[in-house]
Image (spheres, rainbow, N blue to C red):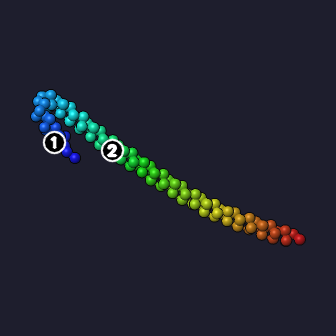
Amino acid sequence: MESLIDIAGPILGDLGLAGIVIFALAAFVWFQTRRYMQLEDRHAQERKDSRNEAEAHLKEMQQLHREERNEWRVEQAKQADKATERMEAIARDVNRIIGGMR
């Protein structure tokens, strides 16, 4: 791709001061357009990075929540086992007391 100066060189020689002004305006527009496109690309990349970070954070939070639920289930199972053992002990004691009364 030819640069702007290579394209405008012959035109500037033929048009004089008007050519310089036109070239300056064209160069200004060209550089501003390129700058805007670079800024837009950078912003698009930042949005993409931000989205990726948010997704990673969400996955991390989901994993932590999943682990917490598993811990809760294990803890509930332990408590249920303890309650069952206590009820069995109470039932044995009640049966022993009732059996001793007969």
Depth check, front residue: 52 or 11: 11
Identify the residue at horizontal 44%, vertical 53% (top origin). Answer: 56
Identify the residue at horizontal 16%, vertical 37% (top origin). Answer: 8
Q: Residues within 10 Å of mark 2 (few under 14, many from 20)?
A: few
- State whether residue 83 is above or below residue 58: below
* Three-letter code, disc 1: Asp
Q: Quadrant of residue 43?
A: top left
Identify the residue at horizontal 13%, vertical 38% (top origin). Answer: 9
Depth check, front residue: 45 or 9: 9
* Three-letter code, disc 2: Asp
List the residue tagged with mark 2. Answer: 41
Q: Quadrant of residue 31?
A: top left
The CA distance from mark 1 to mark 2 is 27 Å
Q: Disc 1 or disc 2, which is closer to the eye?
A: 1
Identify the residue at horizontal 54%, vertical 59% (top origin). Answer: 67
State left or right for residue 6 relative to residue 40: left
Circles 1 and 2 in contact, beta carbons < 8 Å: no
Q: Position of residue 30 (x, y in %)?
A: 24, 37
Give the total of numbered labels.
Answer: 2
List the residue tagged with mark 1. Answer: 6
State left or right for residue 92 relative to residue 55: right
State left or right for residue 18 relative to residue 44: left
- Secondary structure type for disc 2: helix
- Tell which circle, 1 or 2, labels the residue nearer the N-terminal end: 1
State left or right for residue 50 relative to residue 58: left
Q: Position of residue 92 (x, y in %)?
A: 77, 69
